[in-house]
Image (spheres, rainbow, N blue to C red):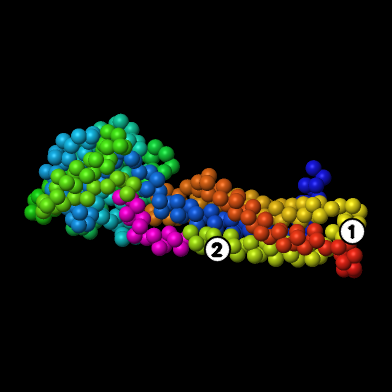
Amino acid sequence: MLIYKILIRNAFRNRLRAALTVIGIGVAILAFCLLRTIVGAWYAGVEASSATRLITRNAISIIFPLPLSYMERIRQIEGVEMVSYGNWFGGIYIDEKNFFPNFCVDPETYLGLYPEFMLKDSEKTAFFRDRKSCIVGRKLATRFGWKVNDIITLKGTIFPGNWDFVVRGIYVGRDQTIDETQFFFHWDYLNEELKKTGHEWADNPNFYIVGVKRPDYAATVSDTIDRMFKNSYAETLTETEKAFQLGFVAMTSAIVSVIQVVSFMVIVIIMAVAANTMAMTTRERIGEYATLKSLGFGPKHIATLVFGESAVISLSGYILGIAATYPAADKFRTELGHIFPVFNVEIKTVFFALLAAIAVAIVAGIVPTVRAAGISIADGLRRMG
């Protein structure tokens, strides 16, 4: 216990310098955690993907439709348990800045394939019965103050016009990895309007979602679907939900890579700051270390004092940084939840931050330790005064 008191007193003997160093490390840890959490948020859709869901889209691009008649043929493939379909709607609520994902889907099959979207039974029944109804995520409802039975109007971009919907349910995610910012309504509602205007996309969904009985069926079913529609006027590309999500992430891989590099550069920079602090501290106390050696303390004892002081400062900064990370993440989630619907600080991020703090302590302390442990008593005492 005495050694810990000595280390703490030594670390904060020069209070201003120690405080500034601790704050610097704390800010670095905060930045590291937030940047790593942003990377995690980028991959949130990938992490939430199911191994038993496949996505079938047009082989040319997802913006091209597929015939509705494909559904029954896909359903008959061995290993397929359920098939759903839908379109990206791309509607705007009041103003362009109010962006959120909105899809038209086949309600019963879609919710059957996504049990992680949890609704009350009464809300689910009301949603199924009313073709002009919609369900929205809890975070989206909170953002705009929507309640059940409210009437919502979206302005179509892909499908022009004003589209009115009645909120029949507010879903919650089964866990923290589920996106609660989405908006779903009936595909039939859109399709009926497209038929009235003779739109070319009538009876043509954007994508199919295929639920397979077991994950090991995924490869076989994917290959069967694509071979079935090969050389048709609308060939398909089928991949696992995880691969589909990774395809979108790959479009912004350069941004993700830059964020990852910056997160580590922050730690490297603070290593230099902490090393400078420890170098000044050791230089000031060379005489003290020489005195300790004259009293019988060996190089190991000196190394313990220097490394211990470096560890106290680094870990104090780590504690400060982690204490600030969670409030900062909550603020970030509140302000930018529409961009990063899933923004959770993971335990592994906290652990990596701890490893970073330990690395800072080691790098900052290693040179001063060698210097202090290796100095002779005569040289050390000569520098006193």
Image side of residue 105 versus residue 242, left or right: left
Question: Mark 2 and mark 1 in contact (Cβ < 8 Å)?
Answer: no
Give the secondary structure at mark 1: helix
Q: Nearer the viewer, residue 216 or 329?
A: 216
Image side of residue 309 versus residue 327, left or right: right
Image side of residue 260 versus residue 204, left or right: right
**Residue 153 place in picture, x, y as percent:** 25, 51
**Residue 102 place in picture, x, y as percent:** 28, 50
Q: Nearer the viewer, residue 103 or 299?
A: 299
Question: Residue 32 appears in which quarter of the rendering?
Answer: bottom right
Which amino acid does the dot numbered 2 rest on? Met
Which amino acid does the dot numbered 1 rest on? Thr
Residue at the location (71% across, 56% down)? 310
Q: Nearer the viewer, mark 1 or mark 2?
A: 1
**Residue 290 place in picture, x, y as percent:** 87, 60
Question: Residue 51 appears in which quarter of the rendering?
Answer: top left
Q: Is residue 107 visible?
A: no
Give the secondary structure at mark 2: helix
Query: Which of pointers 1 and 2 lies earlier in the amino acid sequence?
Result: 2
Q: Quadrant of the N terminus?
A: top right
Image side of residue 1 versus residue 234, left or right: right
Query: Residue beneath label 2, please?
Result: 265
**What is the magenta range?**
244-259
Query: Residue beneath label 1, please?
Result: 291
Q: Pick out the residue farthest to the top.
A: 121
Up/down of 280 relative to 136, above or below: below
